[in-house]
Image (spheres, grey):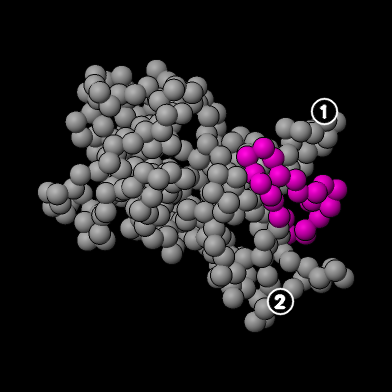
Amino acid sequence: MQNSRNRRIFACINLIFLSLETNLSKVCRHNLKSMHSKARETNYANTNVKRFPVPDDKVSWNEPFPEYNPVIYTSQHILSGPEYADPDISTNPENGVLKFNQLDDGYNVDRTSYTGKYEVVNGLPRNPCGRTGISGRGALGRWGPNHAADPIVTRWKHTSEGDKVYQNEKPVLEFVSIKRKDCGLWAIPGGMVDPGDSVSNTLKKEFGEEALNSLKASQDEKKELLALVNDLFKAGDMIYKGYVDDPRNTDNAWMETLAVNFHDDTGKAFDRFFLQAGDDAGAVKWMEISYGLELYANHVEMIHNVARVHGASLL
């Protein structure tokens, strides 16, 4: 009798977790395009390098494309060997220096993909979302997945009298946005996960550096900022985990991210601090979430997902 009861309880628990995973999966994937487009723009990110044209019906590696001849490009900065970059294996890709689809202990880098196992062809990793018109690493440091963390910090928009702003009977949501120096586009204040670092620590660090300019703060200010960020980031909701349609992507290197929403429901967390752009940001501000947003990569889709999760207005 007891064993039967335990089995029923176990079955119920499994159903609960299955439901949670299904709902989370829906939230993470909702409205995120399956075919990359920004990773196929004519000019590679911030360069005059032209991609080999890839039509929509030839993006998939499963589609024959015998004339496909991607431009080989890795930036001189990456080839110069900065600390965060992998060695250049393009001349001898099958020597096994890098361990793909696993935690690479030799470089303390997680080379697994949020999308699942990716193909390695002739010693080089293959973009799981298809052709991009460029081979090599472009401006990315890692072969294969380059992991980032994107903290989406939100609050409700209020009037000067402190009342919530509504549109079509739904509250208006704002998020912290930075203006990227490299391309001039507004974006989520995220950053790359350093070797050996955790995603959770990267989320806090990047927000502090890019949106609060913690690197320029005094020691006392840093302590206060750290306390603020730690308090705000105690609990977050994962919005997206996967491939990013980024203009820096190539056939052999691509961006992936974990985007987490940290919502300040009272709007009081930043009362004592002003948003201030860090070294990697040209500007920073609270930006109203709407359908008309134009943001870097596929950030706008993540932001729209946040608005849906909170039941906010999207006009």
Label 1 sits on residue: 219
| Residue 45 image position (x, y, % from top left) | 44, 46
Give the structural element (helix, strand or loop) at label 1. helix
Q: Residue at x 43, y 37 (%)?
A: 139
Res. 217 visible in picture = yes
Amino acid type of the residue tagged 2 in the rendering: Tyr
Please state if 120 lies on the left or on the right of 116 as rendered.
left
Image quarter where the C terminus lies is bottom right
Cβ atoms at labels 1 and 2 below 8 Å apart: no
Q: Residue at x 13, y 52 (%)?
A: 64
Question: Which residue lies most toward the front here?
Answer: 48
| Residue 209 image position (x, y, % from top left) | 68, 38
Label 2 sits on residue: 166
Res. 1 visible in picture = no
Above or below, 227 relative to 272? above
Extent of the magenta region:
260-285
Q: Main secondary structure of the magenta part?
A: loop
175 or 276: nearer the eye?
A: 276
The answer to if 165 sits in the magenta stretch is no
97 or 75: nearer the eye?
A: 75
306 or 39: nearer the eye?
A: 39
| Residue 63 image position (x, y, % from top left) | 16, 54
Mark 2 is surrounded, within 10 Å at the Cα level, by few (under 14), some (14 to 19) or many (20 or more) other residues, namely some
Nearer-N-terminus badge (1/2): 2
Above or below, 90 relative to 261? above
Q: Quadrant of residue 186?
A: bottom right
Amino acid type of the residue tagged 1 in the rendering: Gln
41 or 33: nearer the eye?
A: 41
